Amino acid sequence: MTHSVSFSIPFPSNREAQIIADALAPEASQRIPKSSVDITVNDTILNLKIGAEDVSSLRAACNSYLRWIQTAISVHDLI
C-alpha cells in the first residue's frame, strides 16, 4: 500500500475496546478493493491501521471506519 494512516483510540477499559474491535471485525475481514485494514487492541487502546493504493481510497476507508466506530460507541452507550 502506498498511503497509510494509524489511529489509536483510548477506551475506559479493555472490555470496551474489545467490544468495538469485535463489532468492526466483520468489515475488517472483507477484502476491500485498493485498501487494507488492521484492527488490534492493546490494553485499553484500539489501534486501527488503514492502508490504501491512493489518497481517495484512504479517505473513504477512514471515513467509513471512523463512522462505524462512532456508531458502535453510541450503540454501546445506549445499552
Image (tube, rainbow, N blue to C red):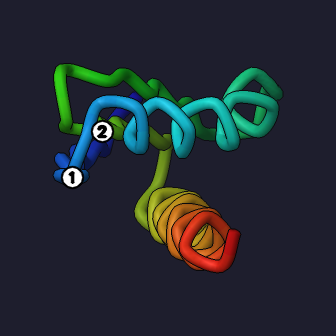
Q: Could you tell me residue 70's position as x and y percent?
A: 52, 74
Q: How crowded is mark 2: few (under 14 residues within 10 Å), some or many (20 or more)?
A: many
Image check: 33 left or right of 53? right
Asked which quadrant contains residue 30, the reply is top right
Image: 37 above or below 52: above
Q: Nearer the viewer, residue 4 or 6?
A: 6
Quarter of the picture holding the N terminus: top left
Q: Which of 4 and 25 is in front in this view?
A: 25
Identified at 25% across, 48% down, the residue is 5
Identified at 29% across, 43% down, the residue is 4
Q: Could you tell me residue 73's position as x and y percent?
A: 52, 68
Identified at 80% across, 31% down, the residue is 26
Three-letter amino acid code of the residue under disc 2: Leu
Image: 79 above or below 12: below
Image check: 32 left or right of 47? right
Whether residue 56 is visible: no
Q: Residue 46 carries which label?
A: 2
Whether residue 60 is visible: yes
Quarter of the picture holding the C terminus: bottom right
Three-letter amino acid code of the residue under disc 1: Pro
Query: Circle 1 sits on which residue?
Result: 12
